[in-house]
Every structure is written in structure tokens, then in C-alpha cells.
């Protein structure tokens, strides 16, 4: 390449150690003090959250909510049958 930029330090920097789908190595530079690039987990905040936040319950399937829905359905069934009797 024949340009005036100083790309020597960039070319000499350590590379990311992640494996690609084609079983090669990622050619992106690793972040300072890290062994991975920004796309493979070198930045802060990348990766899975601490703890298992995916397992938090939203309340729809708690026993109280299920009992409440059963009670409401039974009440609606009784109201419907009462309306049919009145006709």
C-alpha cells in the first residue's frame, strides 16, 4: 500500500483468539489488555448477564394467578348458564 498513514502499530497489534465458522481465527485486533476483539466479548458489558435473569417469573403462571383465572372462568360459566335459564 502506498499511503501516508502509519498502520504499523495496527498491523503489529495482537489479534483476537476467537474461532470463526470456517475454523480460522478472527483477524480483528484484540482490545487493550484483552484477548478478544470488541465483537467477541472484549468490551465491558458484553456477554450474558450475571445470574439467570431469563428465569424470572412474570406472574402469569403463579398458583395465585391460575386460581384466580379458574375462579373467573367458573363465575362466567355460572353467569352464562343463568342467562340461558332466564330465556
Image (cartoon, rainbow, N blue to C red):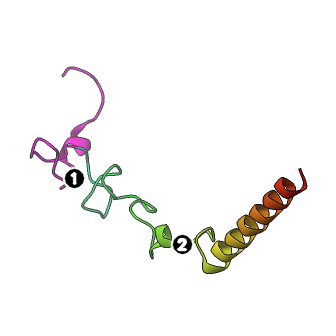
The residue sitting at 30% across, 52% down in the picture is 37
CA–CA distance in space, label 2 to label 1? 34 Å
Number of marks drawn: 2
- Element at label 1: loop
Q: Nearer the viewer, residue 87 or 20?
A: 87
Q: Position of residue 59 (x, y in %)?
A: 63, 71
Q: Position of residue 2 (x, y in %)?
A: 21, 20
Q: Position of residue 36 (x, y in %)?
A: 27, 57
- Element at label 2: loop
Q: Nearer the viewer, residue 13 or 31?
A: 31
In the picture, which quadrant includes the N terminus? top left
Q: Nearer the viewer, residue 7 or 48?
A: 48
Which contiguous range is marked in magenta? 1-27
Q: Nearer the viewer, residue 20 or 38?
A: 20
Residue 82 among magenta residues = no
Q: Position of residue 14 (x, y in %)?
A: 20, 53
Identify the image quadrant of residue 64: bottom right
Mark 2 burial class by Cα count in 10 Å: few <14, some 14-19, many 20+: few
The residue sitting at 9% across, 46% down in the picture is 23
Q: Tell me which label, 2 or 1, sits earlier in the chain.
A: 1
Q: Residue furthest bottom?
A: 63
Identify the image quadrant of residue 76: bottom right
The residue sitting at 35% across, 51% down in the picture is 38
Mark 1 burial class by Cα count in 10 Å: few <14, some 14-19, many 20+: many
Q: Which residue is mark 2?
A: 56
Left or right? Give the position of 69 relative to 29. Answer: right
The residue sitting at 47% across, 67% down in the picture is 54
Q: Nearer the viewer, mark 2 or mark 1?
A: 2
Mark 2 near mark 1, Cβ–Cβ under 8 Å? Answer: no
Q: Which residue is mark 1?
A: 16
Q: Residue furthest right?
A: 86
Residue 11 among magenta residues = yes
Amino acid at each position: 500500500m502506498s499511503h501516508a498513514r502509519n498502520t504499523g502499530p495496527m498491523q503489529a497489534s495482537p489479534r483476537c483468539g476467537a474461532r470463526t465458522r470456517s475454523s480460522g481465527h478472527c483477524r480483528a485486533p484484540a482490545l487493550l489488555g484483552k484477548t478478544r476483539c470488541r465483537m467477541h466479548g472484549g468490551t465491558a458489558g458484553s456477554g450474558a448477564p450475571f445470574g439467570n435473569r431469563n428465569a424470572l417469573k412474570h406472574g402469569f403462571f403463579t398458583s395465585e394467578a391460575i386460581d384466580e383465572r379458574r375462579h373467573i372462568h367458573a363465575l362466567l360459566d355460572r353467569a352464562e348458564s343463568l342467562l340461558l335459564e332466564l330465556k
